[in-house]
Amino acid sequence: MIEANNFEVIIGLEIHVELKTKSKMFCGCDANWFGKEPNTLCCPVCLGLPGALPVPNKKAVEWCVMLGLALDCVIPEFSKFDRKNYFYPDLPKGYQISQYDKPFAINGHLVIPSERSESRNLATKGSASLDFSRRLDRGRNDNLRKICIRRVHMEEDTGKLIHAIVNGEKCTLIDFNRSGVPLVEIVTEPDIRSSEEARSFLKKLHQIVRYLGISDADMEKGSMRLEPNISVRKLQSGKDTPLELPSYKVEVKNINSFSFAKKAIDYEIERHINLLTKGEIPKQETRGWDEKKGITYSQRSKEEAHDYRYFPEPDIPPIRWATNFIRQLADQIPELPDKKLERFMKEFGLSEYDVTILTDDKDIADYYERAVSVSRGVRPSSNSRSDPNAKVIANWIINKKADINKTSPEELVKLITQQNQKVNITEEELVKVIKKIIEANPKAVADYKSGKEQALMFLVGQVMRETKGKVGAEFVKKVILKLL
Ligand SMILES: [Zn+2]
């Protein structure tokens, strides 16, 4: 029997994010390739024709640095591009322009809820006050986890292979529209200890990328792709965790959803534990994820950096940053999810649960804030905790009482005001009326309890008359049933 408790899971993540710049990374071709007719967005540069010279996309480089800053990375003053050499049909040059030893951003981190606290928060819908930095100080075993980020670098996407049947024959077609689209790679340290933590990290990163507005990070379109590196080590008699990493790791390539990433990791963990229990060491390799069968499968042995014969890209001059330019980029970073969450709780007096939903997507958060400011008749910066509308508006958005894609914040506030005017009796008053009616009609109550449905409708009618039809019959019925 396998004792999973005797093992520790080591996970690092590599994530590729396609930037949504107008043009490609090293040429002027349209970068918006998805759904376009194959091989219509290409030029000598992104087709890798001899003599074509790459010119880096300034916006893409700035966005890559901005993501690095948002992940609390250091931005080294000096940076350069390198050639990563390998032969594959989707790579026409025979090498990919990437970054090797001088990436744009290094040594960052991202704070995520630990597995334990995540489930607790959702269960209690708690409104405990949040202070991320203070909670972080209490260390790794508390309810927050700090995942270190090794690097954030810039590269170019490859073409896309399409396996098809043409004239009855199996063949592989190549579409170069995606070739040369700006791609950012984020690499974490092996700090993640479970598939659930991996998932929260990925969700948080996805959220930040979307907040920055640098990518749709749409996993179905492949604009965010996930690659977990997994290994498992045996714990020594339950004592201190050994400091050394296992001698192997398995990389699962190109996963396109959070839940598949979690499943692939869980599948690998179990496979590794099985092998280790038998005294074997899992093979270092790259595997693929078969979403239909829910299993991973061996693709090839894992490459090491030296297999790629990296060398500096001779056609692009190295980059030296001016400090004030980096500062300007930092100033362009909008308020990020954690900060927004804390501020919404303070400013609007909402629970952590409500705010987590409202700040999940920046558009929803902006919509909410706009609606609150409209209801206050002031600009968004105003601050008043005791605003009952802030909670009401939050409820309308969270419970989807109005379609916010079709209703402007102004219209939403109008709707809520109209609704408030209609129901000008509180639930407390209603309960008082119902109690009175119940007391005054013991026979109807007894009839209902002995099975006469009609007696209930009589009571509802009495309450409706007393409240002059201000409350709907269905609601009255529900409250009566609760009180009986
Ligand atoms: Zn091109």
Image (cartoon, grey):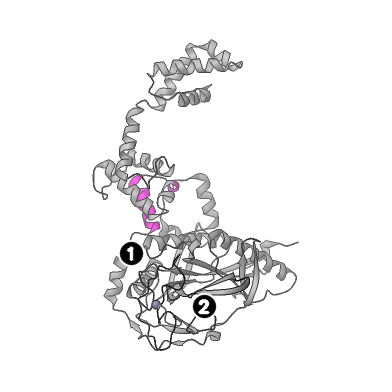
Using the rendered image of the protein, determine whether residue 386 is visible from the camera's viewpoint.
Answer: no
Q: Residue furthest left?
A: 378
Count the marks: 2
* Residue at numbered disc 1: 333
Q: Nearer the viewer, residue 468 or 35?
A: 35
Give how far across and how far down residue 91 sits, in percent.
50, 80
Magenta range is 334-353
- For badge 2, the amino acid type reads Asp
- For badge 1, the amino acid type reads Ile
Q: Ligand 1 within 8 A of label 2's CB? A: no
Quadrant of the drawing holding the C terminus: top right
Q: Circle 2 sits in a helix, a strand or a loop, which is it? A: loop
Q: Residues within 10 Å of mark 2 (few under 14, many from 20)?
A: some
Which SS does the magenta portion mostly show?
A: helix
Give how far across and how far down residue 232 sits, in percent.
64, 69
* Residue at numbered disc 2: 90
